[in-house]
Image: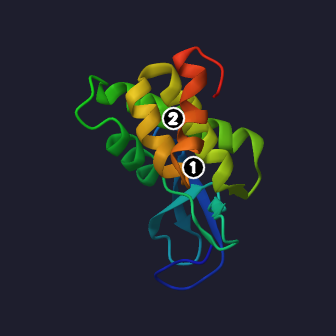
């Protein structure tokens, strides 16, 4: 590590400790040329996740975007914010476990729909109507039939 004071490339670590819930290591160093001390921080280099959109374009993964979609679907519904945060956590965990750097938006949308189906049917229908982009009432009713318990007509 290059000394920020004298620019020498000769130092020793005199103290190391975890910081930020173990995500960062703080190191106190002493330059062996000028004997001054300085601090460095070491963290894992993260490759940002990218979402592959329906049109093939890519954008950075955003927890906030998922939460925002859930909030819109659950507007004026009796769904606690803590439940929505937990859904986002489960979705994010699934993505990090099953994909390396890029995830299709369809996978994220399917995860959100599966989660909403289990907590609030109205929120599920709201989200599905936007996500699936139904062309007509027939497609919409075909989505609702499994929840209504009857065969599609």
In this view of the protein, which residue sits in the foreground, 150 or 2?
150
Q: Residue at x 22, y 33 (%)?
A: 76
The reply to whether residue 21 is in sight is: yes
Q: Is residue 74 above or below residue 146?
A: below
Q: Residue at x 68, y 46 (%)?
A: 107
Task: Estimate the x, y position of residue 142 in percent, counting from the top left.
Answer: 61, 34
Q: Residue 89, which numbered label?
A: 2
In this view of the protein, which residue sits in the foreground, 87 or 106?
106
Q: Tag count in the figure?
A: 2
Q: Residue at x 60, y 78 (%)?
A: 2
Q: Secondary structure at mark 2?
A: helix
Asked where in the image residue 79 lies, by quadrant, the reply is top left
Q: Which residue is mark 1?
A: 132
Task: Estimate the x, y position of residue 63 in percent, counting from the top left.
Answer: 47, 49
Q: Residue at x 63, y 28 (%)?
A: 153
Asked where in the image residue 48 lies, by quadrant, the reply is bottom right
């Amino acid at each position: 590590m290059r000394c920020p004071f004298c620019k020498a490339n000769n130092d020793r670590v005199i103290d190391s400790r975890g910081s930020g819930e173990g995500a960062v290591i703080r190191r106190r160093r002493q330059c062996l040329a000028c004997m001054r001390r300085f601090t460095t921080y070491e963290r894992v280099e993260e490759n940002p996740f990218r979402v592959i959109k329906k049109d093939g374009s890519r954008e950075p993964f955003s927890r906030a975007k998922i939460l925002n979609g859930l909030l819109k679907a659950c507007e004026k519904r009796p769904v606690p914010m803590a439940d929505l945060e937990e859904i986002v956590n489960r979705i994010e965990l699934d993505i990090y476990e099953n994909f390396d750097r890029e995830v299709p938006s369809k996978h994220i949308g399917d995860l959100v729909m599966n989660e909403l189906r289990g907590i609030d049917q109205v929120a599920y229908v709201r989200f599905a109507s936007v996500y699936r982009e139904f062309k007509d009432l027939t497609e919409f009713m075909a989505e609702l039939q499994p929840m209504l318990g009857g065969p599609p007509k």
